Amino acid sequence: MIINPLNAARLARDGQLWSDSTIADGAWQKATDQPDEVAIYFEEEPAITYAVIAEEARRLANGLQQLGLVSGDVISFQLPSWRESVVLDIAACALGLIVNPIIPIYRDRELQFILGDCKSRLIFIPERFRSAEFPSMIDALRTKLPDLEFVVVVRAEKSHDGMLRYEDFMGTAPVELTALPKVDPNGVKCILYTSGTTGTPKGVLHSHNTLGRVIQNSLDYWQMDGDDIMLMPSPVTHITGYGSGMVLPFISPVKSALMSRWDADAAVAFIERIGATASVGATPFLVELVAAAKRKHTRLPSMRLFACGGAAVPQQVINNAWESLENCRAFRVYGSTETPVITQGFIKAGEQHLAATTDGGIYGYEVKVVDAEGREVGLGVDGEIAARGAGMMLGYKNPQQNAESHDEEGYFLTGDIGHRTREGAILITDRKKDIIIRGGENISAREVEDVLHDHPDIREAAVVAMPHERLGEGVCAYIVLARQSSELRVEAVARFAESAQLAKQKIPQHIEILPELPRTASGKVRKDVLRLDIIDRVASTDS
């Protein structure tokens, strides 16, 4: 893996903010110091203690060593928020393997690119999750993935040719801690893929130290301790769920509680059963949690914090949570996979207005706002948000992408437009990147357009975000037909996109047929015009 050379200069500056330990170090220590304490609660299965999870991780580490995996190898997992995900993360960390989480809703198209790009040697998959059957999907791709030597099926009810069973690893002897390699906390711990504006996902590299710093920033600001339990509705294959769901309990006193799929009524019951105190999630989680609590006639008194981000967060959503939940302070936060949690929100008495109207107070990062020429602008003036800090990524896997996304001072150029306020907050006002944020997940407009351009009845397509009541944004395609006599409905477009193996969340939910796309004088499609148009159309439909 190639690390962004700009970050070499960060080591001295950020080193004092790093713990210089790994998640495996924390797991072994907690298994010794507090073996019978719960590490992680699960909604549909028993909680797991530090001793039990450490034992399972040591058994899995032994099995992975026997397969010939060595420090620096990449292993992937496309699992829900199951206990096996936690076990494999610790085992991989102990061996110096690089973990590649893959969101379970990704299908053939995304899988082939991600597994091939990171040269993954092994992938853990479920036999079945929701409506998808994973072994056949992976099997169809294996001839195109020469580096993928091993496939491990988790919770398998039958055998699959050429694939291993996770349960068989649990029969191996636990590896001795003295037989484990020395792992550098500055080394690459994980590679997470995020949608790029070109349609090609970008591999984001984080170390043990960078992820640990992100988590510690939040712990310090939110004053979390051993009495806190973090409810995690986001999948552990997403940066939020990965860090605040799986890493958190092993590098801090805070426990976590994982949900394998979101259900607001089940979340209310889960919170009340375990006494969860905090959560981090996208807008739909907070909206639906508050609504479910009202239906259940509870104000969820144990909850004290809810950090909301990843998509547009209307002011009323935050205000409604403050007023409906007994002790909970909901607030907006801002960040990305590359620079997680740049802001920490407003949680003090009297700060409800700031919590609802800004994207949070800057904490743990240096932030500047720059104009098109890279010059810093003043308070209240819009520009591109740029940030650097001890929690930012090591860099992209592709070194060219590093050069394009950082300035000469090592600031990451987020692609988001906004300004700083006098209270030390950020307010995002627009987006420079051509992406759609659907329920906290980034979708590349270019990727969807590339698929639609293969349709025989489509001459040109421009994909933009459209308002979505539940998910914040949905996918809208403006289409110019290849022939005026053609007829095209959204159902046909959806079937075509699905046949092209586009993941479900990327399939257009709405189309508009135009004779021509609006353009600038230089011929560039005016997506700003299209975004305003679909906002007006949705508003007129709702009124």
Image: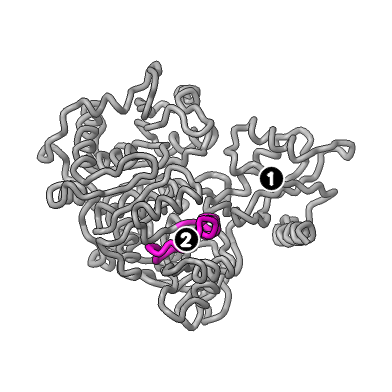
Question: Is 522 displayed left or right of 415 in the figure?
Answer: right
Front residue of 450 and 402: 450
| Residue 424 sits above or below residue 61 on the image | below
Where in the figure is residue 444, as x and y percent of width and height? 58, 48
Where in the figure is residue 239, as x and y percent of width and height? 41, 51
Numbered range of the magenta stretch: 281-306
Q: Is residue 520 visible?
A: no
Query: How crowded is the residue under tag 1: few (<14 C-alpha within 10 Å), some, or many (20+)?
Result: some
Could you tell me which residue is drawn at 43 percent across and 67 percent down? 328
Q: Residue furthest right?
A: 485
Q: Which residue is mark 1?
A: 509
Q: Amino acid at mark 1?
A: Gln
Which quadrant of the figure has residue 77?
A: top left
Mark identifier at residue 298: 2
Q: Residue furthest bottom?
A: 422
Could you tell me which residue is drawn at 30 percent across and 37 percent down? 73
Position of the C terminus, as image quadrant, is bottom right
Which coloring applies here? one colour
| Residue 406 sits above or below residue 382 on the image | above
Position of the N terminus, as image quadrant, is top left
| Residue 124 sits above or below residue 516 on the image | above
Could you tell me which residue is drawn at 80 percent across and 45 percent down? 480
Where in the figure is residue 213, as x and y percent of width and height? 30, 61
Q: Is residue 333 visible?
A: yes
Front residue of 25 and 271: 271
State yes or no: residue 182 in magenta: no
Q: Residue furthest left?
A: 178
Q: Amino acid at mark 2?
A: Thr
Question: Is 7 displayed left or right of 353 in the figure?
Answer: left
**Circle 1 SS class:** loop
**Circle 2 SS class:** loop
